[in-house]
Image (spheres, rainbow, N blue to C red):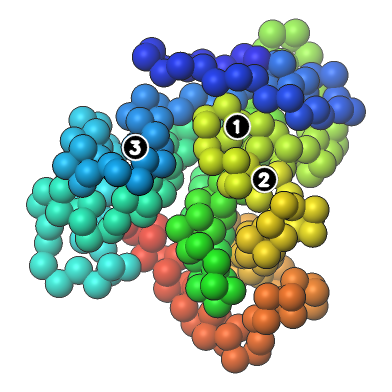
Amino acid sequence: MTVPVEPGVASPPVPTMQIADHPWLRPDDLAIPMLPAQAHRVLQLVADPDVTITRLASVVSKDPVLATRVLGMANSALYGAMSPLRSVSDAVVRLGTRTVRNVVVTVSMHSQVKSPEVYGQEGARFMEHAIGTAYVAHMVAERAREDVDEAFLCGLLHDLGKLVILRTAHDYQQKHKIVIRGNELQAALTDHHATCGALALQFWNVPPDVCEIVRHHHAFEQAGDPQAAAVCYAANLLSHRYGFGCLPDGDAVLEDAVFAYLKLDAEWMARADVRAPGLFSAARQALG
């Protein structure tokens, strides 16, 4: 597997899920984005129920970009900040450890898409859609009484496989001096991004339940926890409806059975229509 790993970060076992149809899209040759060492460490720490605020803040503080974004989020309108915080430790207290994890993953993903020769305009659109879906997933999870922090992370990462496919296609074309046809690339993005995303998350050692939801975010009934996967599925539909990182799909998506499955009625939807764009705007501002 063609995966650059930060020095000092142990490589986890290569995942075993299979993909097909495209000779350039083989599991052993996927160009999985590199997770920065500090972000990898944050994921490890937050998975430890005994992690201390001091330890987590110390790791975040070692990366100026991460520290700035965590402070920015803690001081944003999203968290009703009345007085500005100036220390990362205080920011971790205000946000909570899992929200800090989600901010760190967001920043790490944002750094990956800043390669116009690889992603073109898709990079910026990808991040907007990821952030929008994450915040909508948080809202849907509140209603469905699911884990809101996990829902946010799944919404954020649900299309990670598209980055993997675009980078893999770019590297293959550079190496073999060929051009992959646009319709073939689009078919790979449509058909295999969920599997490729789950492969990448397994390699990052993201919790298995998150990998499972990302793998099945277009077919929530097949997931081990259909309710949690349905939250991600519905959030993705709503993010498309609102036009977060894409052209708005409009109200047609509301005909999907998932909204009845999660009991997202007209009253909830009306509140979401007001709340979601505001959250999206505030998050974009806080995350730079």
For marks 1 and 2, the one nearer the N-term is 1
The residue lying toward the viewer, choosing from 12 and 168, is 12
Q: Position of residue 24 (x, y in %)?
A: 79, 19
Q: Is residue 138 above or below residue 15?
A: below
| Residue at 65% across, 89% down | 266
Is residue 171 something that shows in the picture? Answer: no
Quarter of the image with the N terminus is: top right
Q: Is residue 250 above or below residue 135?
A: below
What is the three-letter code of the residue carrying label 2? Glu
Q: Position of residue 26 (x, y in %)?
A: 77, 20
Proximity of marks 2 and 3: CB atoms separated by less than 8 Å: no
Mark 3 or mark 1, which is nearer to you? 3
Is residue 70 something that shows in the picture? Answer: yes
Q: In this rendering, would 245 be left or right of 185?
A: left
**Would you name the residue on which mark 2 appears?**
212
Q: Residue furthest bottom?
A: 267
**Would you name the residue on which mark 3 appears?**
45
What is the three-letter code of the residue carrying label 3? Leu
For the residues marked 3 and 1, what is the alpha-carbon distance in whole angstroms?
17 Å
What is the three-letter code of the residue carrying label 1? Gln
| Residue at 50% across, 73% down | 142
For marks 2 and 3, the one nearer the N-term is 3
- The local secondary structure at tag 1 comes to helix
Q: In this rendering, would 269 be left or right of 274?
A: right
Q: In this rendering, would 31 be left or right of 188?
A: left
- The local secondary structure at tag 3 comes to helix
For the residues marked 1 and 2, what is the alpha-carbon distance in whole angstroms?
10 Å
| Residue at 56% across, 55% down | 155
Disc on res. 202: 1
